[in-house]
Image (cartoon, helix red, strand yellow):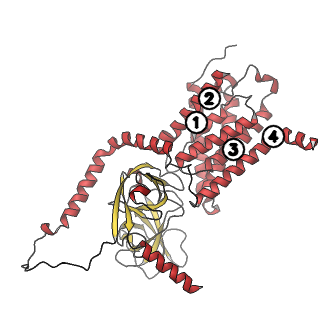
Amino acid sequence: MSRIILTNLVRFLVLVLLQVLLLKNITLYNLSTPYLYILFILLLPFETPNLLLFALSFILGLTVDAFYDTPGLHAAACTLLALVRVLFISITVQKDGFDNEPEPTLSIMGFRWFFTYALVLTLFHHFFLFNLEVFRISEIDYTLSRFLLSSVFTVFLMLVSGLLFFRKKER
Amino acid sequence: MRNLLIFITKYNAFFLFLIFEIASFVIYVKYNSFQKASVINSTNQITGNLYARTDELKGYLSLREVNDQLARENALLRNQLKSSKYIDTVAHKTVVDTIYKQQYEYIAAKVINKSINKRNNYLTIDRGSREGIQKGMGVITANGVVGKIAFVGEHLSIVQSLLHKDSRVSGMLAYNKEIGYIQWGDDMNPRKALLVDVSNNAQPKIGEPVVTSDLSLFPAGIPLGKVSKLKAKGAGFFLNLEVALAVDFSKLEYVDVVVNKFANEQAGLGAQEKKGDE
């Protein structure tokens, strides 16, 4: 138990620092910006209580907001992400499988499931984030292209990090 | 009552979502108008410190460019010195000049955090209310206009960059003297902006400089950019021009905050005028 808390704490710090010190400065062709920090919410254990899940998402969003000078923006997007995560997991994962599959990582859940999971959640988060930030219908074409290209970039980084920390199944 | 509780626990995810989402929106809406002081930004101790530290490291990478710029600016200023000019009339006496009164003062500041890739971009600088910075002051560099102060902390302040959807600076075509205003285009190119609402009588040329007008909070004549395209989209009864910005926002290191000594007087006049209208 304490090991899970420690891993997640370290993951939180590493992802936030990576986001605000490195990825914040990366943009491809003014269009594609990665938001890798949401990987923290994606990788929380299956058995996280809903209250904790939402609270952590909210705190993660506010932390990133503090560095991005946009209070509330990322927090709102992350809260939506938490809801989508709950729905997605309740649809695709059987409840009794929790004992031997503690965390939704790439190495445990397999490539196909993790790819869909990451893609769906990232699309929801980015769509909400970009549209809330711009909040203008007149710029919808740029917003949508930014949303799509950024999602591709983010999912790509998620898969790369999943493969980097790949551990073979012990069973 | 029991049924209600069961209902709520069954769909607890949705209700938690509602609570946190509403909380986020309250924060987002309240803060976005910059009316309320808030701790959730880059002027607080933790975020400010972290940015200042990393900026110290990154500062070494751009020493050469900053040096070049300073040297250029020094040469420019030296050209304006009286001693570097040849005077072809013989001076007889010195005159104590009382015509000029200092209107603008400049506070130099270091940029410790910046972004250019979002729809609304901000900079964080390492000067705050202790150094006399107030909300609404203009920010420039040697190259041109950067933005205006949006939030002041004790030691740090946040600058709303020109690359922001709400930023508008009154600009003027340097040769034609036609006035319009500069705003950032929606294609999010950090090197381009639009000069909109220019009168149709103006006959701008490509490469014509655009400078701040007397109507802005900046001293008149600060460069904004150069006209790069004569027809930009969205033009109606007025001309819209595309302008290549004078400042390279990705390489900002040092900026000057403009302190307008007559700002209070001007604001007072505006208030009087408003009272007269009522």
Amino acid type, residue under disc 3 in the picture: Thr
Residue behind mark 3: A79
Whole-number angstrom distance, CA of label 2 to CA of label 1: 21 Å
**Percent position of residue B278, x then y:** 60, 85
* Crowd around label 2: few <14 · some 14–19 · many ≥20 (10 Å): some
Amino acid type, residue under disc 2 in the picture: Asn
Q: Which of marks 3 and 2 is nearer the N terminus?
A: 2
Residue behind mark 4: B12
Residue behind mark 1: A156
Residue extending farthest to the top is: A171
Which disc number belongs to residue B175?
none
To which quarter of the image does residue B207 belong?
A: bottom left
Residue drawn at point x = 49 percent, y = 63 percent: B184
Residue drawn at point x = 55 percent, y = 37 percent: A16
The reply to whether the C-beta atoms of the residues labelled 3 and 4 are less than 8 Å apart is no
Amino acid type, residue under disc 1 in the picture: Phe
